[in-house]
């Protein structure tokens, strides 16, 4: 006999994990396409973001967007975020955490500056009104390489 309640719970968990994967993909796509409105939609109302260390910690959507725009928002800058190997754990019906591997490339056509980075993202997520949002995100760099292209 199939326990329909347990089956529904397992399906809901799989749907939640998939929704979180889609959310993170949207976050990276919006960064790369400079879709600031879409990027803002990815976050909880009171997020915390730390990019590479405590000197780059932000505690509002506006501060996060300003930092992303200041570092990679110019028209001459192209970026690619590639996220891999998600480890997502549901910690309740409306909370989850996750770890991702990420490869990042940035190139500024005006200056010739290029940056390649590998890092881990450590995230927490919250489900609000049926939608998953990023509550906190933190990058932990593994390597950073820079170069000046001619």
Image (spheres, helix red, strand yellow):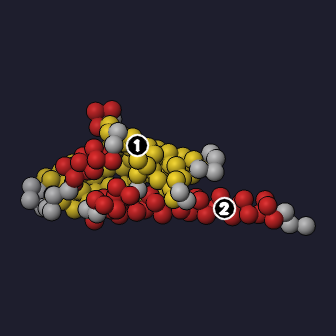
Q: Please say if 92 is above or below 32.
A: above
Direction from residue 95 to residue 72 in the image, left or right: left
| Res. 81 visible in picture | no
Callout 1 touching callout 2 (CB < 8 Å): no
Q: Please say if 137 is above or below 84.
A: above
Assign a secondary structure to mark 2.
helix
Assign a secondary structure to mark 1.
strand
Residue 60 falls in image quadrant = top left
Direction from residue 140 to residue 69 in the image, left or right: left
Q: Position of residue 140 (x, y in %)?
A: 39, 41
| The one of 15 and 79 positioned closer to us in this rendering | 15
Q: Position of residue 24 (x, y in %)?
A: 44, 58
| The one of 80 and 149 positioned closer to us in this rendering | 80
**Residue extending furthest top?**
54
Which residue sits at x=56%, y=48%?
Answer: 96
User: Which sits earlier in the primary sequence, circle 1 or circle 2?
Assistant: 2
| Residue position marked by numbered label 1 in the rendering | 46
Q: Quadrant of the C terminus?
A: bottom left
Which residue sits at x=40%, y=63%?
Answer: 26
- Any mark on residue 12, and which? 2
Direction from residue 73 to residue 117 in the image, left or right: right
């Amino acid at each position: 006999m199939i326990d329909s309640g347990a089956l529904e719970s397992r399906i809901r968990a799989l749907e939640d994990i998939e929704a979180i994967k889609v959310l993170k993909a949207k976050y990276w796509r919006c960064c790369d396409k400079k879709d600031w409105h879409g990027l803002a939609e990815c976050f909880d109302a009171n997020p915390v973001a730390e990019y590479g260390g405590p000197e780059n910690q932000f505690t509002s959507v506006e501060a996060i967007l300003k930092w992303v725009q200041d570092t990679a928002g110019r028209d001459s800058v192209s970026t690619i975020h590639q996220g891999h190997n998600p480890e997502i754990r549901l910690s309740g019906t409306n909370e989850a955490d996750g770890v991702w591997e990420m490869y990042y490339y940035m190139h500024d056509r005006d200056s010739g500056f290029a940056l390649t980075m590998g890092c881990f993202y450590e995230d927490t997520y919250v489900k609000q009104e049926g939608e998953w949002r990023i509550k906190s995100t933190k990058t932990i760099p593994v390597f950073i390489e820079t170069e000046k292209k001619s």
